[in-house]
Image (cartoon, helix red, strand yellow):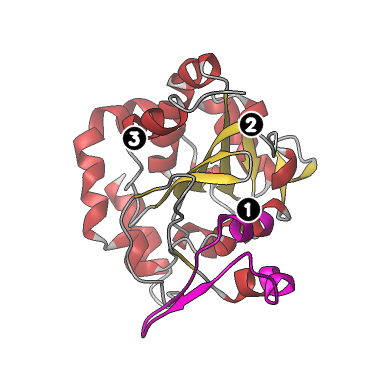
């Protein structure tokens, strides 16, 4: 596994791009909203709101951030992705936009062993989510046929798995991207604490699940919890394998009253 990661690293040494500044895990309430890094794609998506009073901006030397959950929900809601079966669907159609609670896990890519480990943990937790009335949504980088490889081999429930081959949702949410984040970030060492879980998750792993567009392997993921359009939780992975603790997700989504 180490040799596989090393060979990918050397293939992409010239493919890095500037990442937003680091941020910590963010918990939100109905009265507050996290400052999420914000890019040109996100800017274009909320330009129609510029003259309204529904948002404000905070700027500093290193970033511009949006502070309205309405804006991030609107921007993400219009993003089109694909089911694992290949059918196009918009984010806003994945859960009830009024009161529905959804855990949205953005994996790195379908050929990432660490993402197989995260997908396995999410699958094992699905009964907990179901009993709390929470919808589980996992999105990965790659085409729908790559998503099906993970779903069939892990296995993982197909109805919960989606493909974002153009990484549009990742860009809207400002998730990290680049060689440094992917291969050399200190946060990635956390995966060694879960080595047994990783080893079990990749028993039927295939590198064929890697996106055909190899630049997709440089994408980092994140974890989000929504109640309708309200963002309850947001966390960006700092590096490969730096996943949100599921206990944090349970604390947020499984204690929110379901309408």
In-image side of 251 versus 171 (left or right): left
Q: Quadrant of residue 82?
A: top right
Q: Residue at x 45, y 52 (%)?
A: 221
Mark 3 / mark 2, whichever is N-terminal: 2
Determine which residue is flagged by label 2: 100
47 drawn magenta: yes
**Marks 2 and 1, how far apart at CA:** 13 Å
Contact, CB < 8 Å: mark 3 with mark 2? Answer: no
In this view of the protein, which residue sits in the foreground, 189 or 54? Answer: 54
Q: How many marks?
A: 3
Query: Can you identify the residue that label 3 sits on?
Result: 248
Q: Position of residue 64 (x, y in %)?
A: 47, 76
Q: Position of residue 94 (x, y in %)?
A: 70, 37
Q: Position of residue 129 (x, y in %)?
A: 50, 22
Q: What range is drawn magenta here?
A: 45-74
* Residue bearing mark 1: 73
């Amino acid at each position: 596994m180490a040799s596989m990661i090393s060979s990918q690293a050397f293939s992409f040494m010239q493919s890095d791009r500037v990442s937003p500044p680091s941020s910590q895990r963010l918990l939100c309430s109905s009265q507050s909203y996290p400052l999420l890094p914000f890019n040109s794609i996100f800017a274009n998506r909320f330009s129609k709101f510029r003259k309204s009073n529904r948002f404000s901006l905070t700027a500093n030397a290193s970033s511009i951030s949006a502070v309205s959950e309405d804006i991030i929900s609107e921007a993400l809601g219009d993003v089109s992705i694909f089911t694992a079966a290949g059918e196009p669907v918009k984010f806003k159609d994945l859960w009830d936009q009024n009161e529905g609670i959804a855990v949205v896990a953005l994996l790195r890519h379908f050929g990432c062993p660490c993402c197989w480990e995260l997908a396995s943990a999410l699958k094992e937790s699905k009964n907990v989510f179901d009993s709390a009335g929470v919808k589980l949504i996992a999105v990965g980088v790659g085409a729908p046929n790559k998503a099906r490889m993970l779903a069939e081999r892990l296995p993982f429930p197909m109805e919960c798995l989606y493909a974002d081959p153009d990484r549009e949702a990742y860009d809207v949410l400002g998730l990290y991207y680049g060689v440094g984040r992917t291969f050399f970030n200190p946060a990635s060492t956390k995966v060694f604490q879960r080595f047994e879980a990783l080893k079990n998750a990749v028993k039927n792993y295939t590198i064929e699940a890697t996106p055909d567009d190899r630049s997709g392997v440089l994408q980092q993921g994140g974890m989000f919890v929504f109640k309708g359009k309200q963002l309850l939780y947001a966390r960006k992975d700092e590096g490969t394998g730096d996943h949100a603790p599921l206990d944090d997700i349970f604390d947020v989504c499984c204690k929110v009253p379901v309408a």
